Image (cartoon, rainbow, N blue to C red):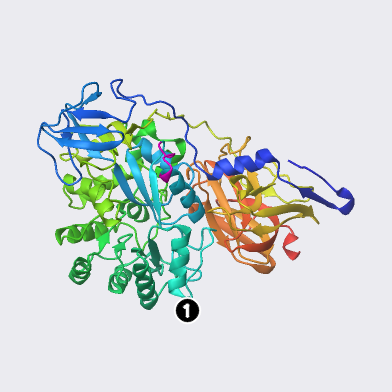
């Protein structure tokens, strides 16, 4: 993968080939494996005017009387009732034995790539995004307004979030204007509003419940943001990580909690305060289950869901957060909080927090419904949490219910989900704006056996950028995703210099040196004979070590390593990435998470054997 060499200078300069950059782009972003015309029932109409007759109809809050007909004209619900006259020539969908629901709304996601297409394929017609690139979100909303988003779920978004310098949300490489002591909060909110944010998200997360420490916003800062946002017509939701931070958020005047918490159940004081303040809660039990040590393998294997999952979605559902003693087995605390809030009349909204480990766009909202029922909601209440309740909480007055005048965002399922909520998984048809969504199964190709890679040295850069993996190290940046980060790799003096700049322009910018583990780009290799990956480095700024694995889905897992003016050996167990090494696809050493220029000197990359400490490839190179 060398584009030019200059051996007269005693070095090799590497430049990224377009194909290599393109592979890096596809590795970082999920892409569907299929698509095309809708399969399902042949009687389903292709136009935007039709009627559904003979089905049970759940209008978002209650089951309507038997014999209800729903008439759709030009993408809008024209009439609902037992005496609806269907105009001659209007196609009629037979609903006997089925249930018609409003299109589902996922009230907590992080969207990029093919997220919106994946969501629609599984009946989610609207996603409420809680943190993504505001420019990307604005582009999607512009297409929605122009009627050019029929093949994907609609998106509404908070854009970037309000967090402390170095706080939660700053670790992903996306440019985040942090809230400091002297920040003009009204101006900060106005800037978000100008970017197109539909609401403001604030972060109250000190990391304590997951065994870490993070800077976080104060109650006074949150209250100031709430005051500024409300004055400019924007609601505020709060990411909370503990019972105490939830209490702080409610006292500061937020409109909703974007998570619940695992450390203890909500006490009567918090429940009463939320009820009196009109606060809603989005429990995100799906992601909390993953944090608490659960998995979503059952959902990934459900025959009603599995055919519509891409390989990336399946892999994401099978991931989980690293196990931590502080949270292990504590999902019951969050479930009890749901029961208490719901019993007190606090609105509960269904949100998955996809695509975090253990979740996937579209699929996990169905899993969230089951978790809400398991926490004490009735199936009907859970369905309301995914339809009318989020529409009402976020001011989406044109959706979330089946009523005259509203958008015909509709889902037809087999069976009765008001009796057994899992029936939402057996989708018959999905309409967005009255248009039938394409729902071709995307298949489930099996994984081929990965070639084994022994533990030991991988690269010492003595003779160039080669590796004992499937190929050479090569430059990888976000430029192929219209990002602007840059990098140059130089092999000199028996080491690899990675020099570049992390720039804004892509939600998760990167620039660094990448190597594929398998015999072809992104093909897996079995490195399970090792327990860790190690390298020696000298870096002027903190930098990131990322791994790609089929276990992780399309998004790599990153560990930030510290700056050091002297050569330093870093060893990161595979377990810290949530993998065992058996499906390793690639390794990436990149600048960031801070934006700006960087330089990393890299040497002695190795796979550390199970019984090894500082092993092969060490030599004397640490003296450089």
Name the residue located 29 percent from the left edge and 59 percent from the top edge: 330
Nearer to us in this view, 109 or 137: 137
Tell me where residue 111 appears, x and y as whole percent: 44, 49
Q: Is residue 386 above or below residue 158?
A: above
Residue farthest front in this picture: 87
- Whether residue 459 can be seen here: yes
Residue lying at 23% horizontally and 24% vertically, measured from the top left: 92
Q: Main secondary structure of the magenta part?
A: loop
Q: Position of residue 328 (x, y in %)?
A: 34, 58
Which is nearer the eye, 406 or 10? 406
- Circle 1 SS class: loop
The residue at the point 28 percent across, 45 percent down is 399
Report the residue at 34% width, 35% height from top.
301
- Picture coordinates of residue 599, whole percent (x, y): 70, 61
Residue density around tag 1, few if under 14, some if 14–19, many if 20 or more, within 10 Å: few
The quarter of the rendered structure image containing the C terminus is bottom right
**Pointer 1 residue:** 181
Q: Which quadrant would residue 212 be assigned to in this image?
A: bottom left
Q: In the picture, residue 48 is in which quadrant?
A: top left
In this rendering, would 364 be left or right of 477?
left
Task: Give the magenta range.
Answer: 145-150
């Amino acid at each position: 993968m060398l584009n030019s060499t200059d051996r007269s200078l005693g070095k090799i300069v590497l430049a990224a080939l377009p194909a290599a950059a393109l592979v890096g782009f596809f590795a970082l972003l999920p892409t569907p494996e299929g698509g095309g015309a809708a399969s399902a029932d042949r009687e389903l109409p292709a136009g935007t005017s039709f009627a559904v007759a003979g089905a049970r109809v759940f209008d978002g809050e209650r089951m309507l009387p038997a014999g209800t007909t729903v008439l759709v004209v030009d993408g809008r619900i024209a009439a609902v009732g037992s005496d609806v006259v269907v105009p001659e020539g209007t196609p009629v969908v037979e609903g006997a034995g089925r249930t018609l629901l409003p299109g589902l709304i996922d009230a907590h996601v992080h969207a990029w790539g093919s997220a919106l297409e994946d969501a629609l394929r599984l009946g989610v017609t609207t996603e409420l995004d809680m943190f993504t690139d505001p420019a990307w979100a604005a582009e999607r909303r512009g297409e929605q307004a122009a009627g050019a988003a029929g093949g994907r779920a609609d998106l509404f978004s908070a854009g970037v979030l309000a967090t402390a310098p170095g706080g939660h949300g700053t670790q992903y490489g996306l440019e985040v204007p942090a809230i400091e002591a002297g920040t003009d909060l009204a101006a900060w909110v106005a800037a978000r509003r100008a970017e197109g944010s539909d609401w403001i998200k604030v972060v109250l997360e000190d990391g304590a419940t997951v065994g870490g420490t993070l800077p976080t916003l104060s109650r006074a800062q949150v209250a100031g943001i709430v005051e500024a946002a409300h004055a400019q017509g924007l609601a505020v939701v709060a990411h909370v990580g503990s019972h105490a931070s939830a209490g702080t958020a409610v006292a500061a005047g937020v409109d909703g909690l974007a998570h619940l918490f695992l450390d203890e159940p909500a006490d009567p004081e918090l429940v009463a305060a939320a009820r009196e303040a009109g606060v809603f809660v989005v429990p995100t039990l799906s992601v909390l289950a993953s944090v608490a040590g659960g998995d979503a393998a059952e959902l990934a294997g459900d025959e009603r869901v599995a055919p519509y999952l891409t390989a990336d979605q399946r892999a994401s559902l099978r991931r989980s957060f690293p196990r931590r003693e502080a949270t292990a087995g504590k999902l019951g605390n969050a479930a009890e909080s749901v029961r208490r809030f719901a019993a007190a009349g606090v609105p509960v909204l269904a949100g998955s927090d996809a695509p975090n480990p253990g979740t996937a766009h579209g699929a996990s909202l169905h899993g969230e419904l089951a978790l809400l029922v398991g926490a004490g909601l009735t199936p009907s209440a859970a369905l309301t949490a995914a339809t009318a309740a989020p529409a009402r909480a976020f001011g989406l007055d044109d959706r979330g219910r089946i009523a005259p005048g509203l958008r015909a965002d509709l889902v037809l399922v087999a069976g009765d989900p008001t009796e057994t909520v899992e029936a939402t998984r057996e989708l018959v048809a999905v309409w967005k704006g009255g248009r039938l969504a394409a729902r071709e199964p995307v298949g489930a190709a099996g994984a081929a056996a990965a070639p084994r890679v022994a533990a030991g040295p991988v690269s010492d850069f003595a003779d160039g950028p080669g590796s004992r993996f499937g190929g050479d190290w090569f430059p990888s940046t976000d430029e192929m995703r219209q990002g602007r980060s840059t990098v140059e790799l130089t092999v000199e003096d028996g080491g690899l210099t990675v020099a570049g700049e992390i720039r804004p322009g892509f939600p998760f910018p990167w620039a660094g040196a990448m190597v594929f583990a398998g015999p072809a780009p992104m093909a897996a290799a079995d490195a399970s004979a090792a327990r860790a990956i190690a390298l020696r480095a000298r870096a002027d700024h903190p930098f990131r070590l990322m791994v790609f694995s089929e276990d992780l889905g399309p998004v790599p897992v990153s560990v930030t390593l510290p700056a050091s003016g002297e050569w330093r050996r870093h060893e990161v167990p595979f377990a810290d990435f949530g993998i065992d090494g058996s499906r390793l696809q690639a390794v990436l050493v990149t600048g960031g998470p801070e934006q700006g220029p960087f330089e990393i000197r890299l040497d002695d990359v190795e796979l550390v054997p199970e019984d090894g400490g500082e092993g092969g490839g060490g030599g004397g190179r640490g003296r450089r």
